[in-house]
Image (cartoon, rainbow, N blue to C red):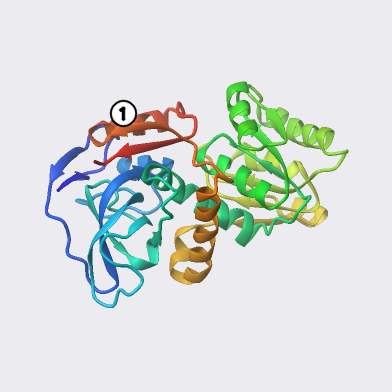
Amino acid sequence: MQALRIQQYGAVDSHQIETTDPAVPGTGEVLIRNHAAGLNFPDALMLMGKYQKRPEPPFTPGRDCAGEIIAIGQHVEEFKNGDRVVAQVFTGAFAEVVLAPISRVFSLPDEVSYADAAGAVTVFNTAYTTCVQRADIKPAETVLITGAAGGVGLACIQLCKQLGANVIAAVSSEDKGSLCKKNGADNILIYKGLNSNELKEFFRSQVRSVNNGQGAHVVIDPLGGDFFTAGLRALAFRGRIVIVGFSSGAISEVRGNYLLYNGLTVMGAPLDINFDLLPAEIRAGTTWWLELLAQQHINANVTETYPFDQIGTALGRLLARQARGKIVLDMT
């Protein structure tokens, strides 16, 4: 089979697709004939050796894939050969055949394409963890989402609307704002060109101006750094902010006295640990949003598709923040 192999960490376009033998599924594992692989910002970091977890090379990277099962290991009763599935593995998805533990494999409704499933699985599972498991968003609450035009941001917009929330999307340009509007955002904040102090005042004042003088009940922040600090200032009394990531490149920091004075809650929304510690919850959440996708209540936002051999180009677009929506690889 063909697989992208990391022999040593380096630029996203420095790695080669090689011929290698597919693995044999062990106990509790399945082998998937890959039709589509989704790309995420952490994938680019992984190839460069900048992700928080660094597998020892050589290895095959990639998180998200969708296809049909072609082999089953021992003690697998949930699936059979030929089943359509989507999987979210830690590594191995950038290959024609993918080995996956059944804890990370989910049945795929017939109405959902392989491309949409592969493009959606990480971002919507992250959004589910953020909006449901951690923020526990309630109907009529106001939610501010930073970096809202990214894959996770768009997924959070859609799930927040499914939960009955009012969504304010913070983005850096008008075209990103239009994309957020198409995904259900109620209000758009465009923050391009602001320094850190200006950003804090902008978020605080603009959220209140579109929310009847009140701050947000919830802030969802995939960006970190100055955006996290500005998000704190936009919260209402006893508001809660969810740290999803640090794609701005700066780790979020907080002053405890500000949290105390305003009664605020800061929480993290890690995804991978859910597969180990809360597998039933993550399976229930994935089943929920996949059914929403099948019924066209939400949208995977796959906007670009590349052949497998152009993965370096596709990941480069992610790093340059040129993508609008999700990028998917055609693995066939």
Image position of 129 (left or right of 320): right
Image position of 130 (left or right of 44): right
Q: Is residue 154 visible?
A: yes
Other-residue count near label 1 (Cα within 10 Å), few / some / many at <14 / 14–19 / ≥20: few
Question: Where in the figure is residue 19, as x and y percent of width and height?
Answer: 11, 45
Residue denoted by label 1: 313
174 and 233: which one is in front? 174
Tag 1 secondary structure: helix
Q: Amino acid at mark 1?
A: Thr
Q: Is residue 278 above or below residue 252?
A: below
Q: Is residue 247 visible?
A: no
Question: Where in the figure is residue 57, as x and y percent of width and height?
Answer: 22, 51
323 and 331: which one is in front? 331
Residue sitting at x 59%, y 46%: 297
Residue sitting at x 66%, y 34%: 170
Work out which residue is located at the far right of the displayed protein and give it. Answer: 213
Image position of 51 (left or right of 211): left
Q: Is residue 242 above or below residue 116?
A: below
